[in-house]
Image: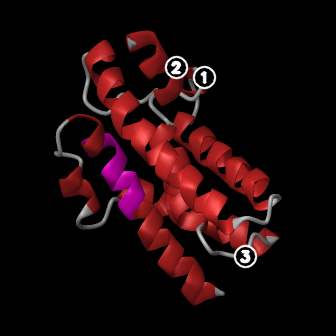
Amino acid sequence: MKKIGVFIATCSYLGHVPIAPGTLGSLLGLGVCFFIRLTGALYLELLLALIIIGLGVWSAGIAEQYFNKEDPRVVIIDEVAGMLVTLFLIPLTFSGALFGFLAFRFFDIVKPYPARSLERLPGGWGVMMDDLIAGVYANLVVRLLI
């Protein structure tokens, strides 16, 4: 189960890319959102986001144990989930996607309250929650810009 958890947490080992793995995870989340939007089914977008969040909490907790480190850099499923939250119900025009991506990366890096304090939650919850909050903040900012 450890290998499966690490595989999921690192998004098929993409998190092992040495340069900007968080940005890569965010781009992956953007791509996932584009593909799911092609179905035209809003419920699938919500369902997929919930599944990724659940898998992220589980797999990030396993990855923390495997790497013996809190929030290992190679874990990028949290960025995928954060981007799905960022883009939820946002029109995926070029500007919507660009502003969403930039806003999410900003909030993910800066971690305004309560994001930074949520990193202290145990296991995979701490890994995921700061990115989910960053996604909420980014979603609200993009809504204001639109």
Distance from the alpha carbon under mark 3 to that under mark 2: 31 Å
For label 2, the crowd category at 10 Å Cα-Cα, with few meaning under 14, some 14 to 19 and many 20 or more, is some
Instruction: Using the image, tell me which numbered label, if any, was put on residue 91.
Output: 3
Q: Which mark is residue 55?
A: none
- Say whether residue 69 is left or right of residue 34: left
Q: Position of residue 94 (x, y in %)?
A: 80, 69
Residue 132 magenta-highlighted = yes
Dots 1 and 2: beta carbons under 8 Å? yes
Quadrant of image for the N terminus: top left
Q: Is residue 19 above or below residue 5?
A: below
Please state if 7 lies on the left or on the right of 40 as rendered: left
Identify the mark nearer the N-term, 1 or 2: 2
Among the 4 quarters of the image, the one containing residue 121: top left
Marker count (numbered): 3
User: Are circles 3 and 2 on residues that touch, CB within 8 Å?
Assistant: no
- Label 1: element kind: loop
- Does the magenta segment cover residue 121? no
Mark 2 — residue? Answer: 7
Q: Which residue is mark 1?
A: 12
Amino acid type, residue under disc 2 in the picture: Phe
The kind of residue on which mark 1 rests is Ser
Tell me where residue 87 appears, x and y as whole percent.
61, 66
The amino acid marked with disc number 3 is Pro
* Residue 29 picture location, percent across and down: 62, 48
Q: Earlier in the sequence, mark 3 or mark 1?
A: 1
Q: Which residues are magenta?
A: 126-133
Residue 114 visible in the picture: yes
Label 3 or label 2, whichever comes before in sequence order: 2
For the point 66% across and 87% down, the residue is 146
Residue shown at 73% from the left, 54% from the top: 36
